[in-house]
Image: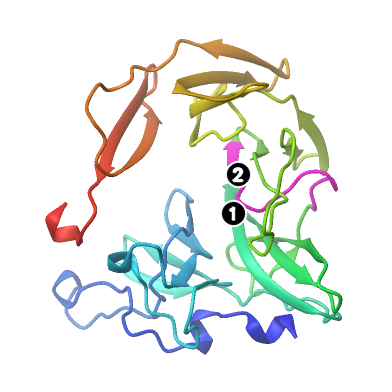
Amino acid sequence: MGITDELRCQTIRPQRVVRPRPDDLALGEKGDAEVCPRAGADVSWTGTELIVIGGTCGLTPDPWLDIPCSGVPHGSTSLLDGARYNPATNRWSTLPAFPRVKAQKGKVTPVGTTAVWNGGVLYVWVTRQVRSATGTISSEIQALRWRPGSGRWRAGPLPPGHVAAYGAAAVSIGRDIALLDGSICMPAFFSCTVGPTTSALFHPATGTWSLIPSNSVLEGARWFIWTGRALVAVSPDVHTTGGEVPGRYAAAFDPAQNTWTALPDLPVSNAQSSGTIVTGGLWAGSDLVASDFMLVPGPPSAA
């Protein structure tokens, strides 16, 4: 049943489309492909193109962030499709359709994708929630890889059984890929209490995986930055035996030594928060630049 629940851009009629504006296009040109509006998509830069994979549409806790999604009257759904944007030509084009998974008993629903560009190849991990006829909830991962110029997806590297892809961050670190801080807690779980998550490195040259040591900052990190030598994780809190300790914490992972090093805590603003804080950062070649901005409740025009 699950495969009939999966939505792709090609199978729905969105109320809006994301495409180049007419006044941005050269005379006689137009966008090639309609791209469904979405939130939470994985975005990768290849050096020449922007690739968008997955994401969700439907209703959200904030009505002004709702994204119309045909056939989804309640809640939200994960999209299983992808598109490429070429800034040189100002055109969108769709990626090949994801391969269908083998039908199985019970209800199978896609709940998320994790994607990363590495070494000229796009790697994608699709997580599906499986509800058996008896109501038992489990998950399955579909691993895919795609190379530009190919008309189809090929089987990708499945992570070790105890490494989750749902909600994970995938970061290209040199020739390898870090799959970080995934969760085994599916949306249908009423409650889910787990210990430290397991992260891993994939080595494309050998097709093998190796585990990344756990770290208190890694658990629940908001963003990751690869500096060329170390992977920096930043988290708004750290997990201890006594619970979560709020702050601005950072740590650096050295893949050559397979070790973490604590970094100085980031400054914490004294301003009162009246909305959702969104954090991010970038590596400027010799310095790490971190920034915050606040999403104020209300329509975007009021922010």
**Horizontal side, residue 277 vs residue 260: left or right:** left
Residue pointed to by mark 2: 170
Residue 20 location, quadrant: bottom left
In the rendered image of this protein, does residue 133 appear above or below residue 230? below
Q: Residues within 10 Å of mark 1 (few under 14, many from 20)?
A: many
The answer to which of marks 2 and 1 sits earlier in the sequence is 1
Name the residue nearer the viewer: 204 or 29: 204
Name the residue nearer the viewer: 256 or 151: 256
Q: Bounds of the magenta span? A: 158-172
User: What percent of the width, then of the height, locates residue 16?
Assistant: 31, 81
**Horizontal side, residue 268 vs residue 144: left or right:** left
SS for tag 1? Answer: strand
Q: What residue type is labelled 2?
A: Ala
Q: Main secondary structure of the magenta part?
A: loop
SS for tag 2? Answer: strand
**Horizontal side, residue 170 vs residue 72: left or right:** right
Tell me if residue 150 can be seen: yes
Q: Which amino acid does label 1 sit on?
A: Ala
The residue shown at (83%, 78%) is 102
Q: Do the residues labelled 2 and 1 touch (CB within 8 Å)?
A: yes
The residue shown at (71%, 37%) is 197
Residue pointed to by mark 1: 115
